[in-house]
Image (spheres, rainbow, N blue to C red):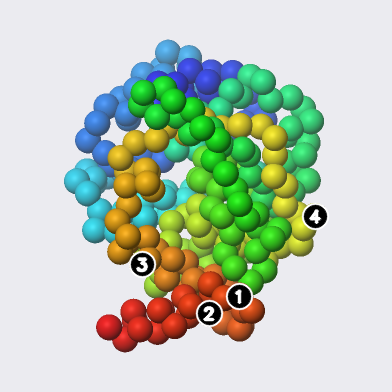
């Protein structure tokens, strides 16, 4: 979080920005860091949605981000005319390098995805590869661009609220839901940007350490969600056909 706080100094107290911080109830010192930051810079455009309950571990971890977004959308700070850049506390962007053209482009789209540079605890960097964009994903869910790379319009969030917060799809995280919902948009409403966010790889987001069983389960749930938002239409794709069979077996079992 310290890296992110250092970067957002450039947009603190600028009237065109609001910084909405969602506390997940973690028992670390992140909330204190944020409050000290607000006090030090007399930040009048930073607002904290503080949790009333300590987070000692959720039964369903994927719900954390959904709960945070729901708080924002039900608050006075949400507007369908604004755009929202999701940012995990471990990630950051060099906000000072973003010029007027960047923000002009964002405002003309319903959803944008930045590029992603992964950084390990050892400092090793690698680019996140998007093999299949939402523009290429009419019959198969897209490669998922991570939460911190996603910028959406408030209108897009509002119009898809029932899909975003549907509780029937376990382990389908917010970033996956937004990526898949973007497949319903027209191509002119979507933009893959050249700018980067920097994402710290750690235990909880390192997919390379995921068990084969969980990978398969996530694929099945992603398949279910993708078909659901497409009104369960048949999709001419071999992978989706296989996942349809596995999904039926999984839910019967």
Neighbour tally class for label 4: few under 14, some 14-19, many 20 plus, Cα within 10 Å: few
Residue holding disc 2: 241
Asked if residue 163 lies left or right of residue 39, the reply is right
- Label 1 to label 2, Cα distance in Å? 6 Å
Disc 2 secondary structure class: helix
Neighbour tally class for label 2: few under 14, some 14-19, many 20 plus, Cα within 10 Å: some
3 vs 1, front mark: 1
Q: Nearer the viewer, residue 153 or 203?
A: 203
* Sequence order check, earlier mark of 4 and 3: 4
- Label 3 to label 2, Cα distance in Å? 15 Å
What residue is rendered at 67% in x and 68% in y? 138
Can the viewer see residue 191? yes
Asked if labels 3 and 4 touch by Cβ distance under 8 angstroms, the answer is no
- Label 4 to label 2, Cα distance in Å? 29 Å
4 vs 3, front mark: 3
Whole-percent x, y for residue 23 in the image:
35, 39
* Sequence order check, earlier mark of 4 and 2: 4
Residue holding disc 1: 237
Asked if labels 2 and 3 touch by Cβ distance under 8 angstroms, the answer is no
Disc 4 secondary structure class: helix
Disc 3 secondary structure class: helix
* Sequence order check, earlier mark of 4 and 1: 4
Asked if labels 2 and 1 touch by Cβ distance under 8 angstroms, the answer is yes
């Amino acid at each position: 979080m310290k890296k992110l706080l250092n970067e957002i100094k450039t947009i603190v107290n600028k009237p065109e920005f609001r910084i909405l911080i969602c506390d997940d109830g973690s028992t670390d010192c992140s909330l204190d860091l944020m409050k000290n930051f607000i006090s030090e810079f007399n930040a009048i455009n930073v607002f904290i949605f503080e949790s009333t309950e300590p987070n000692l571990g959720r039964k369903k971890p994927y719900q954390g981000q959904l709960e945070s977004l729901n708080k924002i959308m039900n608050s006075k700070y949400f507007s369908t005319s604004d755009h929202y850049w999701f940012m995990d506390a471990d990630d950051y962007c060099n906000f000072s390098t973003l010029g007027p053209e960047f923000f002009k482009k964002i405002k003309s789209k319903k959803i944008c995805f930045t590029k992603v540079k992964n950084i390990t605890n050892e400092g090793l960097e690698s680019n996140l590869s998007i093999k299949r964009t939402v523009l290429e994903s009419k019959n198969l869910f897209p490669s998922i661009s991570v939460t911190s790379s996603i910028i959406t319009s408030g209108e897009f969030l509002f119009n898809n609220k029932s899909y975003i917060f549907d509780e029937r799809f376990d382990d389908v995280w917010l970033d996956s839901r937004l990526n898949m919902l973007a497949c319903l948009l027209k191509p002119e409403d979507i933009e893959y940007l050249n700018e980067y966010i920097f994402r710290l790889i750690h235990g909880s987001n390192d997919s390379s350490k995921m068990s084969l069983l969980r990978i398969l389960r996530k694929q099945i749930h992603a398949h279910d969600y993708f078909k659901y938002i497409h009104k369960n239409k048949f999709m001419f794709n071999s992978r989706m056909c296989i996942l349809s069979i596995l999904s039926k077996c999984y839910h019967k079992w």
